[in-house]
Image: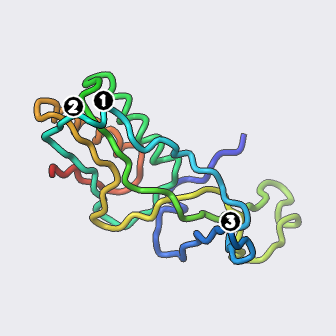
Amino acid sequence: MVSIRPARTCRSTLSQSWSRFSRKKPRKSYVKALPHTSLLVFNMGKQGANYDTTLKLVSEQPIQLRSNSIEAARQVCNKYLEANIPQGYYLKILVYPHNVIREHKMASGAGADRISKGMALSFGRPVSVAARIKRGQAIFMLKTHSQNIEHARNGLRRATAKISGNYKIKAM
């Protein structure tokens, strides 16, 4: 089974962003075939209720997060909140993974040096998509009632375990 590369290989925002994908003008696209995103659900919980407390998960550093890590954080936070305060919260994801991550797949093992004599630092193929997050940008927004604030903080804290980087939970 082929697994994805570790997050440390693509979490830096120092590299150039590759996100140009056009359906109207496909010849102008940098990316010919866009990889699918794991992140499909952006709004969870009960949306229309009158909540008095808003919490945000804010990044303390510029970072690039893959769509599958944001999806894992969403699932663990939503599962905890659904078990502890059902229908008493509204969770929204505020970022969308636009940036295309490219990878030059190399052969490994015995005799691999003869097989992969390719170009150094090559462009690579699109593997996954990521969201570029700036310092101070919010990733998750959680609305709830003031009596549920401890469960809300705990749910967002559990989400930080699934994504790399340093985060703060801010009350708005």
Give me the disc on residue 81. Answer: 1
**Secondary structure of residue under mark 3:** loop
**Secondary structure of residue under mark 1:** helix
Q: Quadrant of residue 73?
A: top left
**Could you tell me if the residues under marks 2 and 3 are in contact, i.e. CB atoms within 8 Å?**
no
Along the line of sight, which residue is nearer the eye, 52 or 115?
52
Q: Is residue 51 left or right of residue 5?
A: left
**Which residue is disc 3 drawn over?**
23
Rounded to the nearest whole Å, what is the CA distance between mark 1 and mark 2?
7 Å
The amino acid type of the residue labelled 1 equals Leu
**Secondary structure of residue under mark 2:** helix
The amino acid type of the residue labelled 3 equals Arg
**Could you tell me if the residues under marks 1 and 2 are in contact, i.e. CB atoms within 8 Å?**
yes
Write the residue at 13% across / 40% down: 52
Q: Is residue 6 left or right of residue 168?
A: right
Q: Is residue 37 left or right of residue 94?
A: right
